């Protein structure tokens, strides 16, 4: 009894030995630990790309193939003023932000099926580091995809007639839209739970992409369809990006909607994904 009391009293007199809270000396704070764990999970995704480089390369090449196909094989869009490539490239940049979600969803469902996430949750790591690491790696891949497609657009003759600030603002809107779509994909992946069901969910990406003004102007469509296309969040992003780039199809007043739509989607699906992740071990 005396020894226990003396030890506790010594710890109170010299808090530097235990941090005053029972933690080892020089223990990292919660913020540092969170960043460290998230970076570890991000590097794990980088290692996955190194082991599967073909999958990462296909994600970069596929949008380029669509750009070439719709720009030169399918032909120009109706009711589009000016060069169709100047109209198509910003739309394709917006459409690219929905591509690759199946890779993210497949990776999440595979980790769920193999029990990898359960093992991570049993380790002394910050809650949510797995999801943050996955999203950070995906956003980096999306940034590279934007750079590749922009370079191809420049090679095809597309030019952004805007200031550097407007150019960066357009890229920011595109990445914000991607971030929102990413968390929708993460939530749906945890709801699906199995890689086999990802293909069924993946089919939903195509109507969202093609039911937009990416390839054609809504004025060339039936009135009811043009109205539906105008409400598509991707159409809002594509129109705002075209306006910032100074190209055909851009209309003032869409930047606010291009910001509010992704934020609204994030406000719904990010908490749902975090809550679903927290319930996995229950």
Image (cartoon, rainbow, N blue to C red):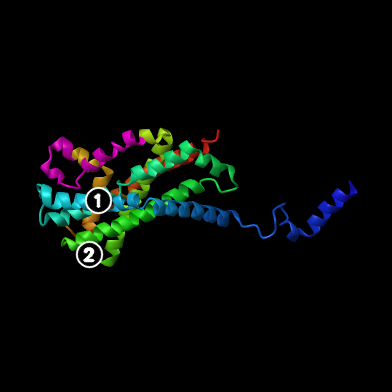
The numbered dot on residue 63 is 1
Front residue (pair 239, 50): 50
User: From the image, which quarter does the C terminus lie in?
Assistant: top right
The numbered dot on residue 162 is 2
For the point 82% across and 56% down, which residue is it?
A: 10
Front residue (pair 2, 196): 196
Magenta span of residues = 198-226
The numbered dot on residue 262 is none
Secondary structure found at label 1: helix
Q: Is residue 205 magenta?
A: yes
Q: Is residue 38 magenta?
A: no
| View extreme (bottom): residue | 164
Front residue (pair 216, 115): 115
For the point 29% across and 48% down, which residue is it?
A: 257
Image location (x, y in percent) of residue 176: 35, 52
Q: Is residue 157 left or right of residue 127?
A: left
Image location (x, y in percent) of residue 173: 31, 54
Front residue (pair 268, 204): 204
For the point 36% across and 54% down, which residue is it?
A: 141
The rendered magenta stretch, by its main secondary structure, is classed as helix
For the point 36% across and 36% down, which residue is it?
A: 198
Question: Where, by quadrant of the figure, is residue 208 drawn?
Answer: top left
Q: Earlier in the sequence, mark 2 or mark 1?
A: 1
């Amino acid at each position: 009894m005396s020894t226990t009391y003396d030890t506790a009293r010594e710890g109170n007199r010299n808090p530097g030995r235990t941090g005053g809270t029972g933690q080892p000396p020089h223990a990292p704070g919660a913020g540092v630990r969170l960043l460290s764990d998230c970076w570890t999970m991000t590097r794990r995704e980088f290692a996955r790309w190194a082991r599967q480089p073909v999958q990462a390369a296909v994600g970069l090449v596929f949008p380029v193939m669509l750009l070439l196909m719709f720009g030169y094989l399918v032909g120009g869009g109706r009711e589009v003023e000016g060069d169709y490539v100047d109209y198509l490239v910003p739309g394709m940049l917006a459409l690219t932000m929905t591509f690759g979600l199946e890779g993210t969803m497949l990776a999440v469902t595979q980790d769920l099926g193999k029990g990898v996430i359960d093992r991570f949750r049993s380790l002394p790591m910050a809650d949510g580091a797995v999801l943050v690491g996955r999203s950070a790696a995906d956003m980096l891949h999306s940034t590279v995809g934007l750079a590749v497609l922009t370079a191809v657009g420049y090679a095809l003759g597309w030019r952004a007639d805007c200031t550097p600030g407007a150019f960066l603002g357009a890229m920011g809107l595109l990445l914000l839209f991607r971030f929102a779509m990413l968390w929708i994909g993460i939530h749906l992946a945890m709801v699906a739970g199995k890689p086999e069901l990802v293909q069924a969910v993946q089919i939903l990406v195509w109507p969202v992409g093609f039911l937009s003004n990416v390839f054609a102007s809504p004025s060339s469509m039936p009135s009811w369809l043009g109205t539906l296309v105008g409400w598509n969040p991707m159409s809002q992003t594509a129109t705002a990006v075209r306006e910032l780039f100074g190209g055909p199809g851009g209309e003032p007043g869409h930047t606010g909607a291009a910001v509010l739509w992704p934020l609204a989607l994030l406000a719904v699906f990010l908490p749902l994904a975090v809550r679903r992740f927290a319930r996995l071990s229950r």
